[in-house]
Image (tube, grey):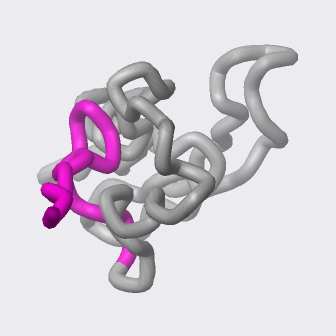
Amino acid sequence: MATEKKIIPQAPNRVKTWSQTQNPKSEAMTGPRFEQTDMDLQPNPPSAEELIKQVPVTFVETRTVACDGGGGALGHPKVWLNLDKNEPQSCGYCGLRFQKKHHHH
């Protein structure tokens, strides 16, 4: 009797894996440890990576910007981002994106 392989999304808002070397959940969550696990009852939080993409880019006037996560004690250590490139730069901790406004002379 062949068992049907159930497709399990990585997160409710993300179907594919985050990296090329990551195994999909349907392959990673197999074997004796998961035989009696009802995956519908397991926690499956949304992908933070997909959620942070929904936050609009913050435009600033300066070439550098500090990010501390914006949560006070619940934030992260302050980091400085260089905004010289003409594209949004992401904070390595929280993923918030910043970009320098370009002024026309």
Q: Quadrant of residue 16?
A: bottom left
Quarter of the picture holding the N terminus: bottom left
Quarter of the picture holding the C terminus: bottom left
Q: Within the magenta stretch, is there residue 4?
A: yes
Residue 98 picture location, percent across and down: 41, 44
Compared across the picture, whether 35 is left or right of 70 comes to left
Compared across the picture, whether 53 is left or right of 32 comes to left
Residue 58 appears in the picture as rendered: no
**Front one among 89 and 92:** 92
Which residue is situated farthest in the bottom direction here? 21
Q: Quadrant of residue 46?
A: top left
Residue 26 appears in the picture as rendered: yes
Q: Assign the magenta stretch its main secondary structure.
A: loop
Residue 75 picture location, percent across and down: 74, 26
Residue 2 picture location, percent across and down: 15, 65
> In the image, is residue 12 above or below residue 73?
below
Q: Quadrant of residue 25?
A: bottom left
Compared across the picture, whether 36 is left or right of 104 comes to right
Q: Which residues are magenta?
A: 1-19
Which residue is situated farthest in the front direction here? 1
> In the image, is residue 101 above or below residue 92?
above
Q: Report the residue at 86% width, 17% height from top.
A: 73
**Front one among 81 and 39:** 39
Residue 48 picture location, percent across and down: 43, 37
> In the image, is residue 59 above or below residue 25?
above
Q: Within the magenta stretch, is there residue 24?
A: no
**Front one among 44 and 89:** 44
Q: Report the residue at 45% width, 62% height from top.
A: 30
Q: How many marks?
A: 0
Compared across the picture, whether 44 is left or right of 8 comes to right
Q: Report the residue at 66% width, 42% height from top.
A: 66
